[in-house]
Each structure stands twice: as C-alpha cells, then as structure tokens.
Amino acid sequence: MDLVLQLLFTGIGIGAVYALVALGFVLIFRATNVVNFAQGEFSMVAAYLMVVFSVDLGWPYWLSFLIALAGMALFGVIFNLGVYYPLRHRTYLPVIIATIGASILLSNSVLAIYGPQPQVLQGWFDTPGIQLGPVYLDSQYLLIIGVTILLVLFNFWFFEKTLLGKKLQATSQDKEMASLLGISVSTMIMITFIYSAVLGGLAGILVAPVLFVSIQMGSTIALKAFAATIIGGFGDVAGAIVGGLALGVIETFGAAYISVPYKDGFAFLVLIAFLVFRPQGIFGERVAEKA
Amino acid sequence: MSASDNMIPAPAVRSKPLIIRHLPYFIGAAVLVALAAGMRFDGYILNILLQATTFSIAVFGLSVVLGLCGQINLAQAAFFGFGAYAVGLGTADLHLNFWLCLVGGCAITLVAGAFLGMSTLRLGGHYLAMVTISFQQIVTLVMINAIGVTHGPDGVANIRRPELFQSSQSYLAFCVAMLAIVGYLVWHLPDTKLGRAMRAVRDNELAAGVNGIDVFRTKVSAFAVCAVLGGLAGGLFAGGFAYVSPDQFSFAESIQFLTMSLLGGVASPVGSVIGTGLLILIPEWLRFLKSVPGLYLAIYGLSVILIIRFMPDGIWGFVSDAFTRWRAHTRAPPVAGALQLKPATSGGDIVLEVTGLSKHFGGLKAVDGVDIAVKRGSVHALIGPNGSGKTTTLNVLSGLYKATAGRIVLDGTDITNMAPHQRTAAGLGRTFQNIRLFRSMTALENVEIGAERPGNTMIGKGDDALTERAMEALTFVGLGNRANELISSFSYGHQRLIEIARALASNPTLLLLDEPAAGLNSTEKLELHELLKRIAAQGLTILIIDHDMTLVSEAAQHITVLNFGRRIADGESMAVLRHPDVVSAYLGSE
Amino acid sequence: MKLTRREFSAGLAAGLAAPALMRSAWAQGATIKIGMCVPVTGPAAEQGLWAQNGAKLALAAVNKAGGVLGKQVELVIEDDQTTNPGIVLAFSKLAAQSDIVAFLGSIRSTQVQAMAPDVIKVGKPVMIGGTNPDLTHSGNPWLFRFRPNDNYSGRVIADFGVNTLGKKKWAIVHSTDAFGTAGGKALSEALTKLGAPPVLDQGYANQSQDFTPVVLAVKQSGADVLGTYFTFENDLGIFARQLRQLGVNIPWVGSPSVVAVSSTKLAGPALFNTYGVADFAEDSSDAAKAFGKAYRDAYKTAPDNQSAWPYDAITILSAAINKAGSTDPNKIRDAILATQKFAGAEGEYNFDKNGDGLHGYNVVKNDKGKIVYDKHIDFND
C-alpha cells in the first residue's frame, strides 16, 4: 500500500508536468488546427532564460521568474510571426513540418549559445520535500500539482467568463463566423501563441529543478504531453489535464509492475490504443469535417 | 477494375512503346552504374555515395506516401530499420542468404506498412503524425531492449553482402542500379490508376471519395509502398555498412528522411535524390561550422522553415512547375468528339427517393425527417435559407455524413449505408459549393479521375479511351482547348465548369450540384444556365442546391424547400415559390 | 683580419641559424598528422569538447618537447555527430587523407563498432576509449584501448564492495544502452564469481524523467549495497535525489558517471559518500596529478576521464611513433603493444596482445562534493 501511494504521488506529479505542456498544445491546436511540434522547446527555452537571469545574473528568483515569463510572451509573438503566420493559409502538413524545423532550430541555437552542459536550477522552496507517513512528497512536485490545479481553474474562468476568452473560443470554433462578428482572427491567434508560450515556459521553469535544465528536457516531455492530449481528446482543456495525469500514473505503475526499460513504450501503446478505439479521446472532439 | 488493377502500377499505354521512349533514362542509369563500378573512389566518397544511394531509396517511399498521397509518415526510419535488421540478423546470426533476407525484410515492412496504413482508416493529419511517431518510438524501444533478438544497443556487426558484390565498388554499383530501377517505378507511379488515386486523395480526400476512389485502400497501399521502399533501402544500407545499431533508426532519422524529401521536392523521385544528396553532402561541406556546437543543426532547422515557407514544392518542384507551365502552353490538346451522356435506367420513374432522412449532431437536428423524390430526367432544386440543412442533406446524400435515420434509394439501389466512393460507383456524381479540384493536376487529369469511375459504361479499355472521354467532357463545358493547363491557372468560374465536367465524365445517373452559381458573375451564371439546359437535354437528372432564385426558378421544374432541417414545401416550381411559408422563411425571419 | 672576422661571424651565424631554419621549414612543410573523430554536435557534444581539450593538451606537450620524428604533430578533427553513421563518415574522411598516420576514435563502444570494418580496411592504428570488452577481442589488430574495459569496472566494483566494504546483497541498476547493459552484465558476472549474485538487476531507459519505480524496486529488494551503470549525468542526478528522498541510504559503488564532475554538480548532497570507479582519479598517481595541474592551468576547470584518455592516447602514440622511428602502421602497432609500465594520467599502461592498455580502476569517493581518491585495484589478467 505504501508503495502504491508513493507511486501514485510520483505518477500524478510527473503527470502534472505532462498536463502543463499538453495545455499549451491544446490551446494552439484549438486556435489554429495545427500541432505545434516545438511546444517542448518552449519549456526548454524558458528554463534556460531562468538560468540566465537567476543563476548567471544572480537576480532574485521572483524577478527572474516574471522576466522569463515576459520573455516567453515575446517569444510567442516571434514564433507566431516566424513559423505559423506565413503558412496560415496552407494545410496542416507544411505547418507541422515548419514547427519541427523550429524545434531543431531552437534546441540547437540554445546549444550553440549555452553549450551542452546540463544546468542546475533551484526550486521555489528551500525544503526539498516532506515525509507524510509512508509517502515522501517532493516539494517541487507539490508545487507543480498546485499550479496545475490553479491553471485549470484559471482556464475555466478565462475561457468561460471573460470576453477575451469567449472571443478566443469563438475563433477556435469557427474562424469565418468569428471574423464576421468583428473579431480579429489574427489577433486572437497571436494571443493564443503568447498564452501557450507562457504556459509552456511556466512548465519548463517548474520542472527544471526536478529534471535539470538541458537541451533535451523539452522534447522528451513534449512527446508524452502530446500523447496526453490525444488520450484526453484533442482540443479539450480538461482532456489535456486528465490525459496528462492518466499518462503519468499509467507510466509509473507500468514501470513499477511490468517493465522499467519499456516505460516510454506504455505511453505510446496507450496512445495507439486510444487512436484506434477511441480517437476522439476521453472527452471527445467533434471529428466531423465540413464539406 | 479489380483490386489487382489497383495494386500494380502498370505503365500507361501510349503511342510508342515505353521502353523506347524512356531509353535515354535507361542509358543514363547504365552509365551511372558503370561509373559507380569503374571509377576509383576513396573510402570517404564511397561511404557518402553508398549512404546517399540507400537513403534516396527510403526517401522515394516518402515521395509516394507524402508526395503522392499526402499522408504524413514520421516512421520511415523504423521501416528502414526493419529492412536493415532483417539483413543484419539474417546474414550475421542466422547465416541466411543475403537475397532471402532482403526479400524477407521487404515482406515484413510490407505487412508493417499496411498495418500502419490501416490506422488512416479513422485518422488523418496530426493524429496520423502521432501514430507514426508512436510506432517509431516503440520500434526503437524494442530494438534497444529485445537484446536476445536484436543484440540491443550493441547492434549487429559482421553483416554480409551477396557473393556477387563483395567489393565495395561493385556493391555501390548494385545499389545505384537498384536506385535506378526503383526510381523508374516511382517516377511512373503517378501515371497509373493507383498513382492518380493517390494524387486525388492528397489533393482532396472528399472529392476523391465522391469521384469513385476507395480512399482507405489507396492510403493503405501508399503506406505499404512507402514501407517496402524503406525496408529495401535499409537492407541495402545494412549490407553496405556491415554494421547496424538502434540509434541509426531513431525518430531523429525519420525527421531527417522527411526533410530530405521536402528539400528536394516531395512529389518526384528526382526531388528525393536531390534532397537526399544535398542533406548528406551539406553537413559534410559545413563541417567548418563545427567550432560552435549546435550551429550547423540550428541552420538546418532554420532552412527547414525557410524551405517550407518559400519553396513549398522543394527544389525539384520549383524547377518542374516552371517547366510544366511552359509545356502546357506549347502542347496542343487532342481534338475531342461530342460528349455522350447515357444515364443508367434500371430503376423506375423516381431516380432518387429519400424518405425520412435525418442527421443529428449531438442535440442539433440539422436535418429532420426530410422526404425528397426526384423524377427521372428532371431538374430538381433543393432550396432553403442559410442554415436550413441543405448542404447537410447533400453531404448525407453523397455519403460524407452518415444518416442518423432514413433511407436513400438511387435508381433502385439502397445506398443509405454506402461509402462515398461506392455511391459514386452506383451512379452518383456531385460538385461542391467550395470547389474541390485536385489542385496539383491539369484540368484533363482531374476529369480523367472522374471518368475512371468504376461502372462507367461510357469508356473503353485503356488510357487512351480515358483521355478521350475526359476530353469530350471538357469540350462539352467549353474548356477542351485548355485541357493541359494546371488548375491554378483557371478562373473561379472555369474551375466550377471543370468540376462539372469531372462529374459528367463519369456518366452519372444523378448529378448533384451544390450551389453551382455561388461566386459566379452574371455572364458566368448565364453560361451555367445554358450548360444545365444542355445536360438536361441529354436526359441526365439533376438535383441542384442553391439559393440563387433566378437560376433555380428558371432551371428547375420541381422544388423542395427546407427550413430548420425540415421540409416546409415541395412541388412544382412556381407554386412552391409563392407558398407563404417559403416567402416568410426567405424574407420574414431576416 | 677584418675580412676573416666578418667571414667567421657570417659562417658562425649561418651555422647557428641553419638547424633552426631547417627545423621551422620542416615544421611548416611537413607535420605528422593524427586524425581524431569526436562529437562536436549531438548529445555528447559536451564530452567531445573535453576530449578535444585533453588531446590538445597532450599535443602541446609533445610538440614543445620536439614533436615526433623531429616534426610537429598536428591534430585533424572531424565531427562524428555522436551518431554511428556520423563516425563512419568522419573516419572515412580522415582515412582518405593518406598523410594521417594514426587516429583517435570514440569513447562510445557502438561508434567504435560501426567504424571497425573501415578500420580494418584502412590498416592504421586507432586509439579508442570505448569500454565494451569485445572491441579488442574480436580480431581487429588496429584498435588500442586507453581505458580499462568494462570487465574490469565490473570486477573492481564487485571486488571493492565485497572485499573492502564487506557487502554481499547487491542491487544493480543499469542503463539499457550498450554501455549500461555490458557493464551491468560484467558486474553481475563478477559478483557471481565472488559468491554474491545480485538480488536485483534492474535496467532503465535513458532520459527517464522519473526513477521512483526503480528506487522502490531497490528498496524492496532488501539489498545492502548498490552498484550502478548510468550513462547520462542528468539521469543519475534525478535517480540519486529520489533514492535519498525515498530513504535508501545503502552504500553505493557505481561506474565512472557517479563521480563525474557534472553529476556531482547536478546531484549535490544526494551523491555524498558514494563510491565510483574512475579510470581517471587526479590523486591516484603523480602522472595523474601532473595532468590535472596542466589541465586546470589551461582550461580553468577540473579534468575528467573524458579528457584523460585522449591525453594519454596522444602521449603514448607519439612516444610509440618515436620509438618505432617510422610512421609505418605495423611498426607503430608493435611499438604501442610494447609499451609497458608507462605512467599515464589514467593509470599504468601495460599493453596486452589484444591492445588493452589498462587492467584496473581507481576507486574514488564523493566526500561532501569533493572527489577523493580511495584506492587502486588492478588485475593481472
């Protein structure tokens, strides 16, 4: 039982990481119908920004944190203008490939600038964790889980209760109709990219103290997050969260009770199973295409 | 029109025997093979050439699945690995014959490719991308962890080559010969029935379906062909380098294959060779950038973005597009006879009988219990304000949506549960509100796809008959003299006419026209009206969906009116248009 | 007199200048070239940089001492991109330059395996750092290893744990890549020979984000000592932290990555009091100390095994060519194989007939973040 609880905590913790990154995927997908293969690199870039500000320049943690997120917002703008916007009238395929190109460009630019050594980034808390009965709770994972819950609430409030959120929703559901109603579609897409970059960045900064800051940190998480989005149902915010958590738990228990080396395989097996038997995911995406 | 016709890329029959027309290609290939065998290379050049040659064959596969069929495959390195491990394990561990292993590897990849292709049944686009990535990751994990079989990360060493090609030079020559043969087949694939089907699926899956193409089988075939080429390439690679290990077949390699394909031009094997060659050579040329780690790959990533942005069809696409445009203006299309329309008449007086048709999206009843009866030889119109459910009805009729309830009978055949391409075979032809032509093809090729409809009694055997029929249809709509031009060079109104010609070439029993007048100017509308009269004169039944009242009232004898998914009026044109409910639906509720 | 004196001074000047002139002319016109395949890009670019540093340091020393066969030595570097096809191309590119007399290959065993067929074809000596025992045991006469192979690391870990620490219940955790699998196997075999077969043999995939299941498996196995083969430092860092968090504090003896500079930095206190085998330990010998000092002076950072083996390889290769008196590959080969009792940074080199130079490891300890030398264990076979 102790074992199960410990695994459950870890699974939820790592699952929350997937969920955070998955959220960024879903937002961009809903707005543009495109999967952003560079989403993981958003997290990586933010973690490195954090290293620059907080470790290299020695600025206070909270200041570095805010500036890094602001930097990510700017990054979202640049990414949209450089990668998505010029291709917005083309099919999904060129855009997917462009984002793959962007992912290669980003990770290797960081490599060129910062070198290949993994970096250490301190967490928000000084205490590494707390022992709760038989279960050890890593403080950074607790923070990640907490932030994930907050974000779910925030997203609900933002998309359901604010005008901007509703406009974003309208845009993601029907671009033509939205533009007829006087919503600037390109502005909405820009806002989506900014928000998604900030979210991805937040995930990167939160996870860096656990996984260290390295060039590959984003791509490994992104693939899992990607699987999580599909399991949850593409285009659904709640689905991304549930999918991420489910994947984290499945993976951890699969590793513990079936096979550690094949751990990464569970994610993809579950994914394929979902794609074949329930492609609309747990929550379901309207798959009907307009003729 | 059996399955086997679809699977085997049979070369087209043209005026001169193919072998003679393509003699220059074979001579060129022979010269290359001789050079590969005879020239003295040092080990470095030899390795580069061997790598470029085998990789090119794998990239050919992508030019089929991505270029021809428009499906993304991010697992080509996995197939490449299958072939490589088949040859590696087979010759090194089991001491089997090289050829046996090569063929065995291809067979395994064929099955695996078809299996992966099956997932396209329900998935497209980003889902497919994800499935192929997952497949790739699982294959890599198995290669690493199934140590008992694959030797794990140690890889397989001491892979043997065939007795005949023991020296590196002769083996290279052999690989170049394989490249030439496979290249030839892939080059001609687009001109075969299967190739045309793939192009149609790529350009517009919906239109392909309603024009009689089995979209699913076409996609599976494309994946299978792609996988086999990957496997063949992998087998040759293993023989060439004598050592394989899992990291050579990772996701990163799949991305590299994809980039090679895109850089050179995804639509043609020539592009594949150019792209592969460049991406193998460029890193070698740019080795001076090595002083800063990551710089080279950063430039590589940037180039991918720029290529996609500015050279969407790759290097070869850029060159050949210019050439095609130039040739279209110089090559005069053949003269065609008059189009004969002979709609089948197996059923009774009512060609299309729709009873109680419903289509619900969740709680929304887009179409709710609609009845329509279209008389043979008539022009029937289905009208209604925006959002009334007309287009949904049409989509249910042509099979793009599955009916929630109700029955559709076409000329005595119940087509309610048929797939789009089966309905087309049963005699349904349609056009789309927002034009869905195969944009990368010429007008003639578009119409040929329509003419190829299974069960089209109006064409004889062979490609010449197909071309003739397509030319007749194009001439019928007045565009015969521009048959060899690409779709992009036609005006909107003319594109609409080509779409109608495509439907006519298939000699349908019933022609569905979805808002044919949308976006046309007044002259074009007049031309369209004339065209509809000429079609109706040949006895073809037409069902028009439109809200252009002039066109509808002049062309149609019979009108059905929908509003909020329900039928509110039905009957003779003039009477229906004066019906108070119809007037209020159009004017009152605004 | 005047004239004679002028003649005399001119003659003297010429006589003094001539050898110097000649030497510099030689140095410019003809150098001895050594090729080096090293990751400049890809996941191991970091390690590649250290390897280059080590090689260049040795090169500078060799050249300062007069070079090889009276010529300056030049290093020709090619990027192997950390991939197998990459190193095949890099090596064949170097091999195509006929004036390169010998090569430095990779520290990665699979890369060495990938290039091995070409090495046989080229027929020139290649110094390697890959530790898979098979590399020098499969009949390739041109591979010379400058690190102890994995059989020795496994034997040393087992010997140290069983005989020095007195622990018999072993848990083994290893990466499922080539290095980890071979190492785990060697350790397991060595333990079985010592009469202490492992109670847990657990593999994991590289770049795992979480090691909780592995740690819990170790915890549940009831092992009283842990032996590890980790490939990547960030994996090791995550594992070490989670191990301590979940309360596993048994002694830990691991492969070199446990005591690598960057693991120490990443894992912090979680790695305190662990032992690692290290082919390079700065305090293990005077030669190692000298190398450490020179490396620090040159690069302002502590050296690592990644830089120590190329340093030794260049040093021994240069000495061997000098001893052979020629660049004939066979003569160089004989001279390398004849190298005995050579004190290098990695240890004492006694080349055996297979081309293995080292036959033992240092055991070092992480003492509050400082790596201190504990003992050296050598085998004779």
Image (tube, helix red, strand yellow):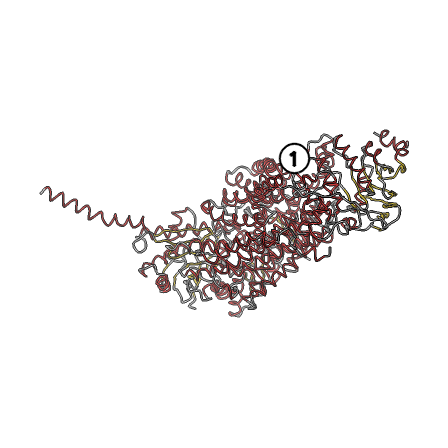
Q: Which residue is at the front of the view, B558 or B312? A: B558
Q: Which residue is at the front of the view, B377 or C141? A: B377
* Type of the residue with mark 1: Ile
| Mark 1 element type | helix
Q: Is residue B55 above or below residue B160?
A: above
Provide residue C332's location: percent of width, then percent of height.
36, 61
Instruction: Report if residue A158 is visible in the image.
Output: no
- Horizontal side of residue C101 vs B52, given as left or right: left
- Going 87% across and 31% down the picture, which residue do you hit? B583
- Horizontal side of residue A183 vs C343, given as left or right: right
Disc 1: host chain:
A
- Horizontal side of residue A117 vs B588, given as left or right: left
Provide residue B518's location: percent of width, then percent of height.
76, 34
Which quadrant: the C terminus of chain B?
top right
The residue under label 1 is A191
Instruction: Report if residue B377 is visible in the image.
Output: yes
Q: Residue furthest left?
A: C1
Provide residue C40's location: percent of width, then percent of height.
47, 49
Which quadrant: the N terminus of chain B?
bottom right
Provide residue B182's location: percent of width, then percent of height.
58, 55
